[in-house]
Image (cartoon, coloured by chain):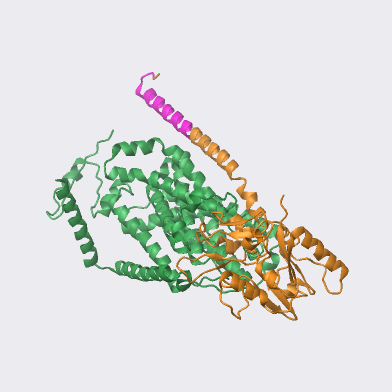
Chain colours: A green, B orange
């Protein structure tokens, strides 16, 4: 009996896959191309070494995979801890609708960061070494532990959704009973991790271009993560509302926007403090690549979105929120790339630009992330129930009287109607 | 503390014969080449800067940045002085390359199972009571092996006795908190490709300032978070209770 059911399931999956290929769309073909290109580069990377696949060298040991995949990947997952802390620690119940997509993104983000690390590490099969070989002086050691522990915590935070799907009530209850300490642990680990990525660059004061070196690097990284978390949640809400035809939680998102604005304001203060403490004036007014990038970061990525989000009218409009979020995320990515790549190029006297294979592997990882998110959103209750109905191509009509319920019965027969009556309590 | 070994490099003495390069290549099994840049096949080189020949090798810092950043302790400063690398621990993160102020560690970029390469002051030879291969091969006394303290005294004496030959700067005495390889020169070190703006602070100190606060952060942070949880939870409960009271009040009943 069970074997038969299994067989049915397998056939079901087979048909789903077949269907997926039969209805090829623009995005699906892009996805496939990215996967194939990425897989080719993967083979080259592991068969012939990092040198064959990347533009990294003795003069420039860290590139796109550290700068984008790891630094940005972790930062963009910050929505997870911001929303989880708001709901479980600060009891801001309004954000509850956001928690599942935010935690899912964070979890996927971290899994993908680990995945990307497997490409970047020269000996990925030794990735478990920090478990048993300790060096508490190393920021990288701290990063390794944070990634391991926080990924586990995120998996646990997300697990109730999976348990729910497979009706494992006992397990679901068990996780629920420890959710508060779990979230607190998660917040501690992720904030530690966000800031430690900044600490990575503390040890290279003589190599880093002065505009980006600061003893405050860990705090700067933390603050930008707090700012970018809500921005990512906002963008995600917009994208998923388009993909799954659901309404946007505008009032909640506009409140989250305030969080970003405050974080950006504090960040700006620290930045100005650095300008004074490190005497950055000569560098600020030198017209070179570093100067241009720095000002772009500050003006377009920090000041502009901060001002926008302070204006109530902007916060109340979909467009205003979306544009501010895009600005914050772009500024954030620019900042991470600047700290990890631009800031070091002058010292090393090299012009590093990633090879097409480095880019293709990054693109493959990002595409895989999108794919898994879509799959999870379809099969698990990531979004609230009504929205899931949309995702499954149902229309949800909420009516408030008997007569309009009657009216539904006169719909053409091709439309299947399922009614659920909710009585007022 | 055990006395630490070091190497004194006197650039005014080097004649550019490259005997050290060859001896080093033989020691490690590297090919002999005419490329005078440190690489995964060159742990020491001799470079020409103007009139001067400058031997280059790992500086073996007193408190090495490479060892402090290695997440698994694959690099460490031995009690004898040399900074050594343990291939079996390495995960290949290349943070050592990023952190080294002298850009000494190199990488086997074209191997599927790569390792970091750098001079280890011939630690095996030193342990056996011998000199490093490059020092032994040097016909001009441009490289002298000995205890760092003694070498520093020799260097100081040399600069004092021959102020016309030497500039009054011993590179490695204070740079990044001191190194076990120290240099003498006849011209300004900046003209020999050295970085002269290095901080006198041991670089690992910059990270340790932050790292050492983590346990405190963890204790205080989680206590604070739990406090916030308790406060907002209580606020919520009280609000619920009051709402309940109000509802009962409007119902006309007394409530509790």
Name the one closer to the observer, A178 or A87. A178
- Is B15 one of the magenta-colored residues? no
Magenta stretch in the rendered image:
B232-254
- Is B246 one of the magenta-colored residues? yes
- Residue A373 drawn above or below residue A53: above
Name the one closer to the observer, A193 or B164. B164
Identify the residue at horizontal 21%, vertical 63% (top origin): A19
Q: Kindly tell me whether residue A318 is visible in this rendering.
A: no
Question: Going by the image, does B83 lie left or right of A367?
Answer: right
**Residue B11 at x, y percent in the picture:** 75, 73
**Residue A25 at x, y percent in the picture:** 27, 68
Question: Going by the image, does A365 lie left or right of B193?
Answer: left
Identify the residue at horizontal 65%, vertical 50% (top origin): B209
Q: Quadrant of residue A370?
A: bottom left
Question: Going by the image, does A189 lie left or right of A268?
Answer: left
User: Quick one: quadrant of the C terminus of chain B?
Assistant: top left
- Residue A183 drawn above or below residue B170: above
Q: Residue furthest left?
A: A413
Identify the residue at horizontal 42%, vertical 69% (top origin): A45
Name the one closer to the observer, A267 or B36. B36
Name the one closer to the observer, A231 or B211. B211
């Amino acid at each position: 009996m069970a074997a038969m059911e299994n067989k049915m399931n397998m056939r079901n999956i087979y048909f789903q896959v077949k269907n997926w290929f039969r209805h090829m769309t623009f995005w699906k073909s892009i996805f496939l191309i990215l996967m194939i290109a990425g897989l080719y580069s993967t083979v080259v990377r592991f068969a012939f070494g990092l040198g064959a696949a990347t533009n990294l060298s003795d003069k420039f040991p860290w590139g796109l995979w550290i700068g984008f995949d790891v630094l940005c990947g972790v930062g963009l997952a910050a929505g997870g801890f911001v929303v989880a802390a708001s709901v479980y620690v600060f009891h801001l119940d309004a954000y509850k609708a956001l928690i599942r997509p935010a935690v899912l993104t964070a979890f996927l983000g971290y899994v993908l960061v680990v995945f990307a690390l497997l490409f970047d590490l020269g000996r990925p099969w030794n990735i478990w070494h920090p478990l048993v070989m300790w060096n508490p002086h190393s920021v990288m050691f701290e990063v390794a532990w944070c990634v391991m522990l926080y990924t586990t915590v995120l998996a646990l935070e997300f697990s109730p959704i999976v348990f729910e799907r497979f009706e494992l009530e006992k397990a679901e209850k068990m996780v629920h009973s420890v959710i508060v300490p779990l979230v607190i642990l998660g917040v501690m680990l992720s904030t530690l991790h966000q800031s430690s990525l900044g600490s990575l660059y503390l040890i290279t004061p003589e190599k880093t271009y002065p505009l980006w070196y600061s003893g405050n690097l860990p705090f700067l990284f933390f603050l930008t993560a707090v700012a970018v978390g809500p921005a990512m949640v906002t963008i995600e809400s917009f994208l998923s509302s388009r993909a799954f035809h659901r309404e946007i939680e505008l009032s909640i998102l506009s409140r989250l926007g305030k969080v970003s604005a405050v974080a950006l304001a504090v960040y700006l203060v620290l930045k100005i403090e650095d300008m004074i403490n490190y005497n950055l004036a000569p560098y600020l007014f030198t017209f070179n690549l570093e100067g241009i990038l720095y000002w772009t970061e500050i003006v377009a990525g920090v000041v502009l979105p901060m001002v926008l989000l302070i204006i109530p009218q902007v916060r109340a409009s979909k467009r205003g929120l979306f544009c501010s979020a895009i600005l914050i995320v772009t500024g954030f990515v620019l900042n991470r790339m600047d700290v990890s790549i631009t800031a070091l190029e002058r010292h090393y006297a090299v012009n590093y630009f990633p090879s097409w294979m480095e880019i293709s592997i990054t693109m493959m990882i990002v595409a895989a992330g999108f794919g898994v998110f879509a799959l999870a959103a379809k099969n698990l209750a990531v979004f609230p129930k009504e929205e899931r109905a949309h995702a499954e191509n149902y229309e949800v009509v909420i009516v408030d009287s008997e007569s309009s319920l009657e009216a539904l019965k006169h719909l053409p027969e091709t439309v299947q109607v399922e009614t659920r009556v909710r009585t007022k309590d | 503390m055990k006395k630490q070994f070091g190497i004194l490099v006197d650039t005014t003495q080097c004649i550019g014969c490259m005997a050290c390069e060859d001896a080093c290549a033989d020691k490690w099994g590297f090919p002999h080449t005419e490329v005078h840049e440190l690489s995964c096949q060159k742990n020491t080189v001799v470079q020409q800067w103007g009139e001067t020949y400058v031997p280059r090798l790992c500086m073996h810092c007193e408190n090495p940045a490479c060892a402090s950043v290695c997440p698994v302790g694959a690099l460490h400063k031995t009690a004898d002085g040399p900074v050594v690398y343990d291939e079996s621990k390495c995960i290949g993160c290349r943070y050592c390359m990023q952190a080294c102020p002298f850009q000494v560690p190199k990488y086997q970029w074209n191997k599927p199972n790569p390792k970091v390469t750098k001079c280890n002051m011939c630690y095996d030879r030193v342990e056996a009571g011998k000199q490093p291969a490059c020092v032994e091969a040097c016909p001009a006394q441009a490289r002298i092996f000995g205890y760092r303290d003694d070498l520093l005294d020799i260097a100081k004496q040399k600069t004092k006795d021959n102020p016309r030959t030497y500039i009054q700067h011993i590179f490695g005495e204070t740079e990044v908190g001191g190194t076990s390889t120290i240099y003498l020169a006849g011209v300004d070190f900046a003209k020999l490709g050295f970085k002269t703006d290095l901080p006198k602070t041991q670089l690992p100190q910059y990270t340790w300032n932050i790292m050492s606060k983590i346990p405190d952060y963890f204790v205080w942070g989680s206590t604070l978070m739990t406090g916030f949880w308790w406060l907002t939870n209580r606020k919520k409960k009280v609000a619920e209770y009051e709402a309940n009271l109000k509802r009962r009040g409007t119902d006309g009943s007394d409530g509790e």
